[in-house]
Image (tube, rainbow, N blue to C red):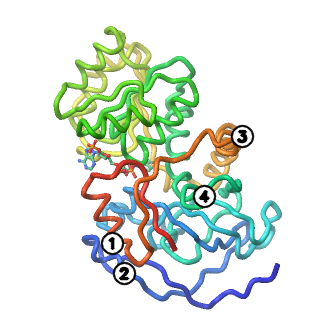
Amino acid sequence: MTQVLPEHMTAIAIDAPGGPEVLVPREVPVPRPGPGEVLIKVAYAGVNRPDVLQRQGNYPAPADASPLPGLEVAGSVALLGEGVTTLLPGERVCALVAGGGYAEYCIADAAQCLPVPESLPLAQAAALPEGLFTVWHNVFERGWASEGETMLVHGGTSGIGTMAILLGKLFGLTVIVTCGSPEKCERAREIGADHAIDYKAQDFVEEVARITGGRGVDLVLDMISGDYVPRNLKCLAEDGRHVTIAVLGGAKATLNMAVVMSRRYTLTGSTLRARSREFKRLLAQEIAAQVWPHVERGELRPVMDACFPLAQASEAHRRMEAGDHIGKIVLEV
Ligand SMILES: NC(=O)c1ccc[n+]([C@@H]2O[C@H](COP(=O)([O-])OP(=O)(O)OC[C@H]3O[C@@H](n4cnc5c(N)ncnc54)[C@H](OP(=O)(O)O)[C@@H]3O)[C@@H](O)[C@H]2O)c1
C-alpha cells in the first residue's frame, strides 16, 4: 500500500515551560522513520502525568527523543523504516514512544508496537502502553510479585493505579489501594481492588495492618515517596519489596535502615522513559507474550476517563492536574 504523506502536520508543542496554556497546536514537519522504526498515523494519544511534568519543565525529554509531549499512541502504520519486516502498512498498532505522541504522526520503534485486535477500540489501545509497560516492569520484574501475594498501590484511581489493579487481579494478587476520596475508593473497588483505603479519612498503615491481620503486604507500588516511604515500610511483610515509580510527595525520605535489614526488605524503583531501546524492546516482547493474550481475549481493558480533541490538549492537562479523573485521559487526533 503506497501512502502519500504530507510534509507537515499538526502537533502540540510546549512553547516554554509553564501551565497548560503553553500547550499549543503548531505546524511541524512530519518525521521520517529511521532503521527499525515506523511512522504511525496517530488516531489517539494517551495523556500521562509525566507529560504534565515535562510541560512544567521538570521532566526533560531524553536527548534522542522528540521534544513534543506524548508517550503512547494508537493508530495505523503509515510508513516502514529500513529493515522493518514485522509490521505492514495500514496495520492497527499501539506503541510506547519516547515522545511526540501529541501529533498527527509519530515515530515508534517497530519492536515497541503491539498489534491492536479488532475488538479493541483505538482510543482504549492508546491508553494501554505507558501503564502496561510501567506496571508490568515495576510490579512483576522489579517487585517480583507472584500469584497469591498482596500488593499496596497508592494513587489507586490514577492511570497507573488502575492498571496496577487490573494487572494485579489478572495475575492473582490481592490488591489494596489508597485513594483521596470515598468516591474514588468506591470506583477502585468496582475496577477490582480488593480493598480501598481513603487516606484522607484513615491512616493507611493501620488499615493495611488490619486488612492483612498484622502480616503486611508483599509489595508496595509507590508514586508518592517523601514521608510515605517510612510509612510504607511499616506496611511491608518480611521480605517485602518497595518499588518507587514517582515522587509526587517529595523525593527525600528518612528511613530506619535497621528495619530494612532485620525484615529483609528490598528497595527499588525505575523510570521508564530514560531506558534504552533494547530494554523497552525486551519489555514489549515480555508483555506481548504474558499480557497481550489477555487483551486479545478482551480480559484486559484500560479504565477510561475522558477524551479531548488534540487541539484541546491544554484542557486534558487541566483535567489531570485537577485530580478528579479516574483512569486514563486520551487525545483524539
Ligand atoms: N517510573 C515510571 O516509569 C513512571 C511511568 C509512568 C508514570 N509514572 C508516574 O506515576 C504517577 C502516576 O501517573 P499517572 O499518569 O497515572 O498520573 P495520574 O493519573 O495523574 O495520577 C496521579 C495520582 O496520584 C495521586 N496523588 C497523591 N498525591 C499527589 C500529589 N501530590 N500530586 C498529584 N497527585 C497525587 C492522585 O490520587 P488521589 O486523588 O487519590 O490522591 C492521582 O490519582 C505519576 O507521578 C507519574 O509521573 C512513573
Task: Say which label, 1 or 4, has the lower sequence index.
Answer: 4
Distance between the Cα atoms at labels 2 and 4?
27 Å
Task: Say which label, 2 or 1, has the lower sequence index.
Answer: 2
* Type of amino acid under label 1: Ser
Q: Which residue is mark 4?
A: 121
Asked if residue 245 lies left or right of residue 210, the reply is right
Q: Which residue is mark 1?
A: 314
Task: Say which label, 2 or 3, has the lower sequence index.
Answer: 2
From the viewer's perspective, is residue 32 above or below residue 58?
below
Determine whether the residue tagged by mark 1 lies in a helix, strand or loop.
Answer: helix
Q: Quadrant of residue 8?
A: bottom right
Q: Position of residue 212 (x, y in %)?
A: 36, 13
Distance between the Cα atoms at labels 2 and 3?
38 Å
Distance between the Cα atoms at labels 1 and 3?
36 Å
Q: Residue at x 72, y 88 (%)?
A: 4
Q: Nearer the viewer, residue 248 or 89?
A: 89
Q: Which residue is mark 3?
A: 289
* Type of amino acid under label 2: Val
Q: Residue at x 34, y 41 (%)?
A: 223
Q: Are marks 1 and 3 in contact (CB under 8 Å)?
A: no
From the viewer's perspective, is residue 170 above or below residue 111?
above
Comparing labels 2 and 4, the label whose residue is closer to the camera = 4
Q: Which residue is mark 2?
A: 24
Q: Residue at x 43, y 34 (%)?
A: 268
Determine whether the residue tagged by mark 2 lies in a helix, strand or loop.
Answer: strand
Q: Are marks 2 and 1 in contact (CB under 8 Å)?
A: yes
